[in-house]
Amino acid sequence: MVSPTTRLLIASLLAVTAAACEAGKAAGPDNFMGDARRGTELVKQYHCGSCHDIPGIAGADGNVGPPLQRIGTRTYIAGYIQNSPDNMADWIEDPQRALPGNAMPRMGIPQKDARDIAAFLYTLK
Ligand code: HEC
């Protein structure tokens, strides 16, 4: 027989563990829930390389925007926005919403694709 106190203890331990897992997912790029491998394919599909030099993507040697070498560890996106997985996904989904008037066009990228692309960009360290 498990006492009510023990049950309460177990329940609160489980709650703390669950909260810690959630925090871990949200916090670090390493736990970011995008699919980097799918993101690699999407970067080719959306032709990001026509404007950007992107390591590991064949033919991606554009020079309209900045090279994306080590973008995963850069402090700011486009010099203004704190670089975080969420902000990066928002940027890709709609750079004109993120920073109105900047030179990167809105490409109509769905949120899921944007998150996967962000996961790929975070592999560039
Ligand atoms: C038509 C050209 C063009 C295309 C296509 C394009 N970008 Fe950009 N991108 C830009 C420009 C220009 C900037 C610089 C914006 C600024 O700093 O104000 C930029 C900035 C960025 C940045 C921030 C870079 C930094 O150094 O802070 C990232 C990340 C980025 N683009 C990713 C992508 C991805 C991923 C794709 C494909 C889904 C893509 N871009 C497609 C032109 C483009």
Image (spheres, rainbow, N blue to C red):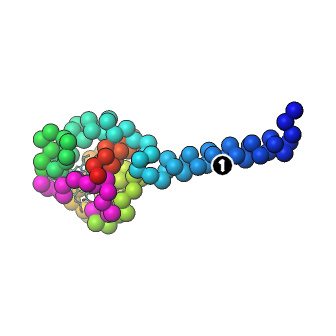
Residue at 41% from the left image edge and 47% from the top image edge: 30
Label count reads 1
Residue nearer the viewer, 15 or 96: 15
Q: For residue 110, which quarter of the picture?
A: top left
Q: Residue furthest top?
A: 1
Q: Is residue 114 visible?
A: no
**Where does label 1 land, which residue?**
16
Judge left or right: residue 33 versus residue 92.
right
Judge left or right: residue 105 versus residue 17.
left
| Ligand 1 within 8 Å of the CB at mark 1 | no
Q: Is residue 80 visible?
A: yes
Residue at 31% from the left image edge and 53% from the top image edge: 72
- State the quadrant of the N terminus: top right
Instruction: Decide: few, some or many residues near mark 1? Use Cα within 10 Å; few <14, some 14-19, many ≥20.
Output: few
Query: Which percent across, then down, holds residue 41?
Result: 26, 35
Q: Is residue 84 above or below residue 117?
A: below
Residue at 19% from the left image edge and 46% from the top image edge: 55
Q: Which residues are magenta?
A: 63-78
Ligand 1 appears in which quadrant?
bottom left
Query: Which percent across, then down, holds residue 91?
Result: 33, 54
